[in-house]
Image (cartoon, coloured by chain):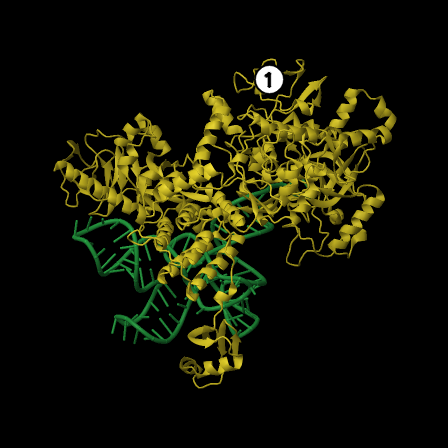
Chain colours: A yellow, B green
RNA sequence: GCUCGGGUGGUGGAACUGGUAGACACGCAGGACUUAAAAUCCUGUGGCCUCAACAGCCGUGCGGGUUCGAUUCCCGCCUCGAGCACCA
């Protein structure tokens, strides 16, 4: 009896389970099953197939950070996955790989702190990333996975470095060539330092001319030294961005606002011997070829800015009573007659020579002052004008006038020639300088009448030249040309192009990077022979510099080439490995080449590159540089790494902050440590804030204030009057403690209990928070008390008690406290960064557990245009989840019965399907995924309305949807009887005929405003349409008996009646 | 300061090449089913006026213009975001 009952219960339970399986869309089972199956069957494996057109989709290399992926990261991965899957359905052979940019600073910083080998933490992080990526159902060919820290990978990074080292840039052929060509040239022609049309701060300038015979007579050491001035990878002494806190130099793009991009540490200029790559040689090509690639405007613009081309002229000013002359660079040679002074950078080499005895002291002081100011200080107060007269005078080359020579901080040593001709009338910086020091301001380009040249410079490049000798009457354009001619004729200068781009500093005084494959013999660097690669990263005892300041690699024991020659001790920067990785994916396991000729010929270049815009001037410039270099040497057939590049917008987070109430600083000092023994409490009766003191204060002194109070002027006034203020640095509250009320925007509702018990605080802090007061307008609560209290509206002046504590108002009154309902609010910042420290990381895994990967994928795409930044919010995810459930319902009814039938579809069903095919296809090609998701929703809604269960229609729908929601589609596809994966299917072909309409409901507008709709046959001509429209009642009503002036009929669109 | 993007309901967003502004979704309100909840389904939902319907008026940051017709094109301004910034 007992048993029987149990059995029955069990059967019932099992039956329910069964039913549940069939009726419900069980995403976790489906996704787990198919992910496993795809992995087992290597569904996404790619190989070269000459019969198919290729398509290469690449995501920017992630750096595997310890924090794991948050919901912002997959946005681009999902988008690229959709494109990859779509292209595959369209018959392309798709390469869609993934790997890791695994060398870098964070892992090393972590290693320094914990002593763990960076390889270990990096591997852990990679494993975590992989796990997360797999759960999203991304169709990568994991057999092609690469890691930049893998010796099999970095041997080729080192190999490319050696190619750079063994090359020089031939400006005549305009490409990189083997250094042997140059040596041969030296052996036959020598070297003549004559003409340099480009100023890039490059170092060819310092090479003295020599003859062929001299070259041959030089020692090897001397020859090598000369060659170093030409190699594309070279070592030189140069000012670099030194970051003491990170203990390394940084490239220009790694410095933002005078501090390091990673960590925000101060950066100073330091003269150091450094490896650099001669990217400046490619400046012009990097700029020009931007026109050949389909990249976002913002990236192109950023690169153009970064390269910073400006055309102008060099010009030499003779100096009175001095042998040397000052060379300046100007983009406005036409304003030559407006020059009233010359300014040198404080680092300018001629300063000492030119300064007259009378000014020596002032100049020395000034130069000393300027040189000791950090980059950051200089940048911080650019508006502050400083300068010093040298006592010297230059001679104007055309007027012969004397021009004072000044030194000014606003002139940068590293740009142009480090000297400018001051034209205060037509350059705002020169104007500010002239005004500050009372120098002459001369107008040489006629400014508009209402423009006072003494007040502000006239910088526009248009107008007639005046006060300018032989240039008078010309317009700016003609004057520019004529001046340059005159300058060249006089032999005092020539037309020149200047680039802002600097050579890229390549050495890092750090451990966790690729060793630079170089050894030193007699102080001269030699590249390692290629067959000795890879040069492995040696083990060291500590990841810190040595006592005498050598980089960590100097700690390695007996780490010498052939046991005797020192290796280079710096390592490559983070961007080295990522500058060519797109090539390795083509043939990642190749042992003899970075990739086989066959693979390179087949895959060519990336067709679609997706990633964040933060790499605009770093990675994306370097990868273009390396690509062009490898192209020059004939290693690859393409000049650019990626045909099309799209930046996905950032997904921003919502952060939640609470503020503590503090004493003002002055009070703090007077008040022995700032104990807050009183706190504000709102009196409902008087409608005023009052300062309350509890008689036997047993609770803590901390007071948190509800977010709405920080925006409440009454409250702010009150606390200010009481020497209180909200702490300026907020406490970020983990968004897991927050709930949202749709009626309250800009604030979150804090769950105080989970907040104060949160394990992310240490025990002491938690104890503190438990007794803290949480103040709202309606009352306050002690963290632990679970009750809000406020002043009783009918208070009497006497003691009152809560939790056994007698409390009273400090001044006179004793007040009773009553409990109230109140929520404590946090202040929301809607468009903040998602980061661990801001405690607003939303993990994709959590979303996947709750809704499944397909919902996550659809939802991320549905949020809005790919390229637009948008805040993350789970509001709305239900919509995409419901959509998938509705889709499921088309296949299984309420009772879990399979619905598909093999009948011929109706025209209405075909119309819905083909409308969707057209829309989705166009949208994917335009990367407009949000609209394609809504097209799917419309489609499913309409097929649902039509009660469509036709196998042919729904199968095609599955194929359409499979790039977006691969798991559910694969499941239903196989349930529909297909043996092969849906990824092998063909994209349905759009047939226009199903969409042809015979009738159209014309909107009829009167004077542009739509008043009515009339259904008409589309074959009607304009005349017939017009007569029908005129017969319409509503139209007649609007005409009020008048004749229309005109009737406009746009076929299939609109009819407009003009009255 | 310069350059490049944006500004559309309560919210995310849609609108082809100048042709019915607000698709789709969230939220909200009402209803159905349910002992109840969840789930699901149905209806409504830019604002104003109106008991309501019909009709009407207003409405894509602001002001003007071009056009039969403007979220879309042009001019001026406001504003938000991003990038660059003594670059001669």
The percent coordinates of residue B43 (x first, y second) are 30, 64
In this rendering, the answer to whether A1052 lies above or below A171 is below
- The picture quadrant where one finds residue A767 is top left
* Residue A221 visible in rendering: yes
In this rendering, the answer to whether A762 lies above or below A930 is above
The percent coordinates of residue A621 (x first, y second) are 62, 40
Q: Nearer the viewer, residue A809 or A526?
A: A526
In this picture, residue A31 sits left or right of residue A636:
left
In this picture, residue A984 sits left or right of residue A355:
left
For the image shown, how many numbered marks are present on the structure?
A: 1
- The picture quadrant where one finds residue A195 is top right
The percent coordinates of residue A609 (x first, y second) are 56, 44
Q: Nearer the viewer, residue A480 or A672?
A: A480
Q: Nearer the viewer, residue A974 or A134?
A: A974
In this rendering, the answer to whether A28 lies above or below A957 is above
* Residue A840 visible in rendering: no
Q: Nearer the viewer, residue A569 or A850?
A: A850
Quadrant containing the N terminus of chain A is top left
Residue at left offset 71%, top offset 49%: A442
User: Would you call the spot at circle 1 few (<14 residues within 10 Å), some (14-19), or many (20 or more)?
Assistant: many
Circle 1 SS class: helix
Residue at left offset 37%, top offset 36%: A732
Label 1 is found on which chain of the structure? A
Q: Residue furthest bottom?
A: A1041
The percent coordinates of residue A967 (x first, y second) are 42, 45
Q: Residue furthest left?
A: A1
In this picture, residue A897 sits left or right of residue A31:
left
Where does label 1 land, which residue?
A: A554
């Amino acid at each position: 009896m007992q048993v029987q009952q149990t059995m029955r219960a069990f059967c019932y339970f099992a039956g329910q389970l069964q039913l549940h399986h069939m009726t419900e869309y069980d995403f976790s089972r489906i996704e787990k099953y198919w992910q496993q199956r795809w992995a087992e069957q290597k569904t996404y494996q790619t190989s070269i197939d000459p019969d198919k057109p290729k398509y290469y989709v690449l995501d920017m290399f992630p750096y595997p950070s310890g924090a794991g992926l948050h919901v912002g990261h997959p946005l681009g991965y999902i988008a690229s996955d959709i494109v990859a899957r779509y292209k595959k359905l369209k018959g392309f052979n798709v390469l869609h790989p993934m790997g890791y940019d695994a060398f870098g600073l964070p892992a090393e910083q972590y290693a320094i702190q914990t002593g763990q080998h960076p390889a270990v933490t990096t591997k852990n992080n990679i494993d975590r990333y992989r796990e997360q990526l797999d759960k999203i159902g991304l169709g990568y060919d994991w057999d092609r996975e690469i890691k930049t820290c893998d010796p099999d990978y970095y041997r080729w990074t080192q190999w490319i470095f050696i190619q750079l080292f063994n090359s020089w840039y031939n400006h005549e052929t305009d490409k990189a060539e083997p250094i042997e060509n140059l040596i041969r040239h030296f052996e036959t022609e020598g070297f003549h330092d004559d003409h340099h049309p480009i100023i890039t701060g490059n170092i060819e300038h310092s090479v003295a001319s020599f003859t062929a015979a001299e070259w041959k007579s030089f020692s090897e050491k001397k020859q090598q030294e000369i060659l170093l001035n030409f190699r594309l990878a070279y070592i030189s002494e140069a000012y670099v961005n030194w970051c003491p806190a990170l203990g390394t130099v940084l490239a220009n793009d790694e410095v933002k606002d005078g501090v390091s991009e990673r960590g925000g540490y101060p950066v100073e200029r330091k003269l150091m011997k450094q490896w650099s790559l001669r990217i400046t040689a490619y400046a012009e090509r990097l700029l020009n070829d931007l026109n050949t690639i389909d990249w976002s405007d913002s990236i192109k613009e950023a690169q153009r800015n970064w390269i910073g081309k400006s055309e102008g002229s060099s010009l030499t000013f003779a100096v009175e009573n001095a042998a040397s002359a000052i060379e300046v660079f100007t983009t406005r040679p036409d304003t030559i007659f407006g020059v009233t002074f010359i300014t040198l950078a404080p680092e300018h080499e001629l300063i000492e020579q030119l300064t007259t005895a009378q000014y020596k002291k002032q100049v020395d002081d000034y130069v000393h002052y300027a040189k000791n100011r950090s980059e950051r200080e200089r940048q911080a107060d650019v508006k502050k004008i400083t300068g010093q007269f040298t006592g010297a005078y230059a001679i104007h080359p055309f007027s012969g006038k004397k021009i004072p020579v000044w030194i000014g901080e606003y002139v940068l040593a590293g740009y142009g020639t480090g000297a400018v001709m001051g034209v205060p009338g037509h350059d705002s910086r020169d104007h500010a300088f002239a005004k500050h020091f009372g120098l002459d301001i001369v107008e040489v380009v006629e400014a508009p009448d209402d423009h006072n040249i003494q007040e502000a410079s006239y910088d526009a490049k248009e107008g007639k030249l005046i006060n300018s000798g032989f240039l008078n009457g010309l317009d700016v354009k003609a004057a520019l040309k004529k001046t340059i001619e005159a300058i060249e004729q006089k032999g005092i200068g020539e037309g020149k192009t200047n680039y802002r781009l600097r050579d890229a500093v390549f050495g890092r005084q750090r451990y966790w990077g690729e060793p630079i494959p170089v050894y030193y013999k007699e102080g001269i660097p030699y590249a390692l022979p290629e067959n000795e690669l890879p040069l492995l990263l040696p083990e060291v005892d500590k990841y810190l510099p040595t006592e005498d300041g050598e980089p960590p690699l100097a700690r390695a024991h007996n780490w010498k080439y052939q046991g005797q020659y020192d290796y280079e001790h710096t390592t490559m920067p983070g961007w080295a490995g990522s500058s060519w990785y797109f090539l390795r994916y083509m043939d990642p396991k190749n042992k003899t080449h970075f990739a086989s000729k066959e693979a390179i010929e087949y895959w060519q270049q990336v067709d679609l590159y997706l990633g964040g815009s933060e790499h605009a001037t770093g990675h994306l410039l370097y990868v273009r540089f390396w690509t062009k270099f490898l192209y020059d040497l004939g290693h690859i057939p393409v000049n650019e790494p990626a045909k099309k590049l799209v930046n996905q917008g950032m997904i921003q987070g919502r952060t939640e902050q609470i503020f503590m109430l503090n004493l003002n600083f002055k009070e703090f000092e007077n008040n022995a440590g700032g104990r807050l023994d009183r706190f504000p409490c709102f009196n409902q009766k008087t409608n005023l804030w009052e300062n309350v003191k509890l008689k036997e204060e047993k609770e803590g002194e901390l007071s948190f204030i509800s977010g709405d109070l920080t925006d409440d002027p009454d409250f702010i006034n009150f606390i200010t009057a009481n020497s209180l203020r909200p702490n300026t640095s907020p406490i970020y509250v983990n968004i897991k403690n927050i709930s949202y009320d749709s009626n309250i925007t800009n604030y979150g509702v804090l769950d105080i209990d989970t907040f104060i018990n949160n394990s992310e605080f240490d025990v002491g802090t938690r104890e503190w928070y438990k007794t803290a007061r949480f103040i709202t307008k309606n009352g306050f609560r002690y963290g632990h008390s679970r009750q809000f209290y406020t002043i009783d509206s009918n208070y009497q002046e006497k003691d009152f008690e809560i939790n056994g504590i007698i409390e009273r108002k400090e001044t006179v009154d004793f007040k009773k406290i009553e409990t109230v309902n109140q929520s404590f609010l946090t202040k929301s910042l809607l468009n903040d960064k998602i980061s661990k420290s801001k405690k607003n990381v939303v993990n994709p895994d959590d979303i996947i557990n709750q809704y499944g990967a397909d919902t996550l994928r659809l939802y991320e795409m549905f949020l809005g245009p790919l390229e637009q930044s948008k805040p993350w919010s789970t509001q709305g995810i239900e919509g995409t989840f419901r959509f998938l459930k509705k889709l499921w319902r088309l296949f299984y009814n309420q009772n879990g019965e399979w619905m598909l039938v093999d009948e011929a579809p109706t025209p209405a069903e075909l119309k819905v399907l083909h409308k969707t095919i057209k829309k989705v296809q166009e949208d994917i090609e335009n990367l407009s995924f949000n609209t394609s998701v809504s097209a799917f929703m419309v489609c499913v809604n309409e097929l649902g309305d039509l009660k469509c269960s036709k196998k042919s229609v729904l199968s095609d729908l599955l194929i359409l949807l499979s790039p977006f929601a691969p798991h559910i589609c694969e499941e239903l596809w196989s349930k529909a009887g297909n043996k092969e994966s849906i990824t092998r299917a063909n994209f349905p072909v759009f047939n226009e005929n199903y969409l042809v309409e015979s009738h159209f409901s014309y909107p009829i507008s009167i004077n542009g405003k739509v008043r009515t709709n009339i259904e008409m046959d589309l074959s009607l001509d304009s005349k017939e349409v017009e007569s029908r429209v005129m017969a319409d009642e509503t139209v007649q009503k609007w005409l009020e008996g008048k004749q229309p002036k005109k009737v406009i009929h746009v076929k299939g669109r609109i009819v407009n009646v003009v009255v």
